Structure formats: C-alpha cells, structure tokens
Image (cartoon, rainbow, N blue to C red):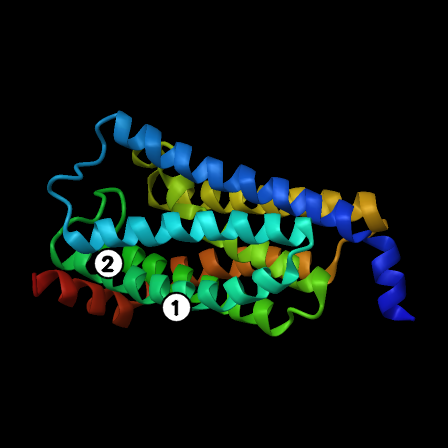
C-alpha cells in the first residue's frame, strides 16, 4: 500500500524527467564554472601536476556518466542503467581516493589558494569526497527504492558542486568565514529545487531530500570545525612543512 501511494505521488516518467533535466543543468554549471575560471587565466594546465589532470578527467567522466544514467532511466533502459551503476561506483571510489591525494599534495606543494588555510583545505578535500562517496553507496544500496535512489544520487552530485561554486564566488573578498557560508547556501538552494519539486508532486518534501539538506549542513559544519581543531591544524601544517 505504501509503495503504491508513493508511486502515485511521484509518477515515474514525470519525476525522472525532472531529475534528468536537473542532472544536465548541474553538469553544465560545473563545466561552465571551471571553463570561465580557465578563460580568465586563473588555471595553469601546463604547470599542473599529472594527478590534477587525472582528477579533472575523472570528474568529467563522472559528469558524463551521471547525465547518461539519468537519461537511461528516463528512456526505460534499466538493464544498461544497472550495469553502468557498478562502473559509476568504481569511478566514485577512485574519485574519492584521488581527491584526497590531490588535496594533500596541494598542501605539500603549497598550491592551496591563499584565502584558504591548510587545515580548511585538507578538511574540505577529505570530508567532501568522503560524504560524496557515502551518498553514492547509500543510493546504490537503496536502488530498489526509486525515490530514495534518485534523490540520494542527486544529493551526492550537489555535494561536489562546491569546487565549481568556489570558482564563481569572490572568495578573496568574502574571506574564510563567509565563503563556506555562501557556498553552503548555494548548495542548499540546489536541494531546495528538489524540495520544490517534491512539494509540487506530493505536497510534502521527501525524506531523502531532507537528508540531502542535512548532508550539506554536516559537510560544511565538519569542515569548519576541523579547520580550527588544534590537532587537525597541526596535521595540516605538518603536511605543508614536509613539502
């Protein structure tokens, strides 16, 4: 009875059409954010270490796979969708490990943006990708619960919008306190788009959407907390000193 009620509240095709469009929109946002950063001369591909390029390729692969998976679900090609799901899991785990390594090496090579402390950057690059991977794993575990699966996958995508948003906000002006607040607000706005969809379709916000909002809040709260936690600060500074 409960499953039937949920399917009636969220008609499959219309619900998936929304998530497919949102997937395309977020992927385009990330590409445009990084593209304008490069066009403004803020990136130096020729001097970037090889792992930075590898990280970029992995993230572009994830964006393409994320859009493809949503399109496959919309077209009803669930068999291929499920097969690619296991590939996406392997890619996500690779991205998480590479993201942590890239963050650590940025500190060691003194490539951290000047408006971030080493501790903040270390926390951001570790907590963010850990939550991202955790959300994807949870979504795959709940793949038979369609509404949870869709929303958790989109929530994972929203969590890794932070680097793209960071290339649009004036971080040097906002400073180390206001920057994460503005970034967090933007990510919560993206969750709010899902919440508005839930309200239109079912008259209430789905629990998975609420969980996505909580994940955003937890991510920035933990990152900010670790950035001023003395043992963690000492760890980050030790990595920097080793470079």
Q: Please name the residue shown 13% across and 51% down the image.
A: 110
Residue 243, position in %: x, y? 7, 61
Q: Which residue is under mark 1? A: 93
Q: Is residue 167 left or right of residue 107?
A: right
Residue 71, position in %: x, y? 60, 47
N-terminal label among 1 and 2: 1
Q: Please name the residue shown 71% across and 63% down the image.
A: 146
Viewer-closest of 46 and 70: 70
Query: What crowding class fits label 1: few (fewer than 14 Cα within 10 Å), some (14-19), or many (20 or more)?
Result: some
Q: Secondary structure at mark 1?
A: helix
User: Residue 6 got which mark?
Assistant: none
Are the residues at dot 1 and dot 2 in contact (C-beta closer than 8 Å)?
A: no
Viewer-closest of 224 and 206: 206
Q: Which residue is under mark 2? A: 102
State whether residue 194 is above or below residue 34: below
Viewer-closest of 55 and 186: 55
State the CA–CA distance, disc 1 to disc 2.
Answer: 14 Å
Q: Is residue 166 left or right of residue 157?
A: left
Q: Is residue 227 visible?
A: no
Viewer-closest of 75 and 127: 75
Q: Please name the residue shown 25% across and 58% down the image.
A: 103
């Amino acid at each position: 009875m409960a499953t039937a009620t949920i399917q009636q509240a969220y008609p499959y095709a219309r619900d998936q059409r929304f998530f497919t469009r949102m997937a395309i929109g977020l992927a385009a946002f990330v590409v445009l954010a990084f593209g304008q950063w490069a066009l403004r001369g803020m990136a130096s591909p020729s001097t970037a270490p090889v792992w930075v390029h590898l990280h970029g390729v992995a993230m572009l692969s994830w964006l393409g796979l994320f859009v493809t998976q949503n399109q496959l679900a919309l077209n009803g090609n669930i068999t291929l969708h499920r097969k690619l799901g296991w590939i996406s899991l392997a890619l996500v785990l690779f991205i998480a490990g590479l993201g942590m390594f890239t963050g650590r090496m940025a500190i060691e090579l003194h490539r951290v943006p000047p408006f971030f402390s080493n501790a903040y950057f270390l926390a951001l690059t570790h907590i963010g990708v850990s939550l991202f991977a955790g959300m994807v794993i949870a979504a795959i575990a709940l793949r038979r619960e369609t509404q949870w699966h869709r929303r958790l996958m989109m929530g994972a995508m929203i969590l890794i919008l932070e680097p793209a948003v960071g290339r649009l906000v004036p971080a040097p002006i906002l400073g180390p306190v206001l920057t994460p607040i503005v970034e967090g607000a933007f990510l919560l706005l993206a969750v709010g788009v899902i919440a508005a969809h839930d309200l239109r379709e079912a008259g209430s916000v789905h629990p998975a959407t609420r969980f996505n909002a909580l994940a955003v809040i937890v991510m920035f709260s933990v990152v900010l907390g670790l950035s001023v936690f003395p043992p963690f600060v000492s760890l980050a500074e030790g990595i920097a000193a080793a470079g």
